[in-house]
Each structure stands twice: as structure tokens, then as C-alpha cells.
Amino acid sequence: MFAWGGLLFDALITPALCWRRTRWPAIAASFVFHWMNSWIFLIGPFPWLMMATNLLFLEPDSPRRWVNWCRASFGLGAPR
């Protein structure tokens, strides 16, 4: 079950990460999947590295938008 589930997940997650409408649910599913792999199988840093690579699928201006949102929400100065 784990082998087939992992195969199906790997086959479907890349298109889901590439499509804007499903990107955030796919990122959440990827985090859960890789966290479970880390917890169940104890395979070292690989799952954590895979979680970090999810950042590659975000829009290029996402970090700037997050910083501007934090500044506006918490009163940390004018957005740039």
C-alpha cells in the first residue's frame, strides 16, 4: 500500500504543483507526505530537503508579497 500510494502521489504531485489552482493544496499534501516519510521511515534529511524544494514552485514575487503583507499587518513600516 505504501509503495503504490507513494508512486501515485509522486506521479500526481508534480502536475498539481505546476498548476496555480492546485498549488497550495499540493504543497500542503507534499508537506504531510514528506513529514510522514520522515516520521515513519527515518530516512535522514531527504524528506526535509524535499519540503524545502516546494519553494521552487511558488511565484517569483511571493517572498516580496509576504514581507509587504507582514509589514502592513504588524505595522513594521511602509511596504517597498
Image (cartoon, rainbow, N blue to C red):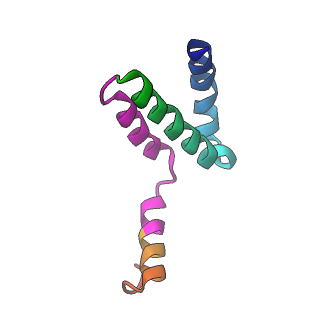
Residue 53 drawn in magenta: yes
Work out which quarter of the rendered image holds the C terminus and state it.
bottom left
Residue at left offset 46%, top offset 41%: 54
Segment tinted magenta in the rendering? 43-66
Residue at left offset 63%, top offset 33%: 15
Q: Position of residue 3 (x, y in %)?
A: 56, 13
Residue at left offset 57%, top offset 16%: 2
Looking at the rendered structure, the number of numbered marks drawn on it comes to 0
Vertical side of 15 occupied by 77: above or below: below
Residue 68 drawn in magenta: no
Q: Position of residue 26 (x, y in %)?
A: 60, 41
Residue at left offset 61%, top offset 22%: 11
Main SS of the magenta segment?
A: helix
Work out which quarter of the rendered image holds the N terminus and state it.
top right
- Viewer-proximal residue, 61 or 49? 49
Q: Residue furthest left?
A: 44
On the picture, is 5 further left or further right than 44?
A: right
Vertical side of 16 occupied by 64: above or below: below
Vertical side of 33 occupied by 26: above or below: below
Vertical side of 77 occupied by 7: above or below: above
Quadrant of res 7: top right
Q: Would you say residue 61 is visible in this rendering?
A: no
Q: Would you say residue 29 is visible in this rendering?
A: yes
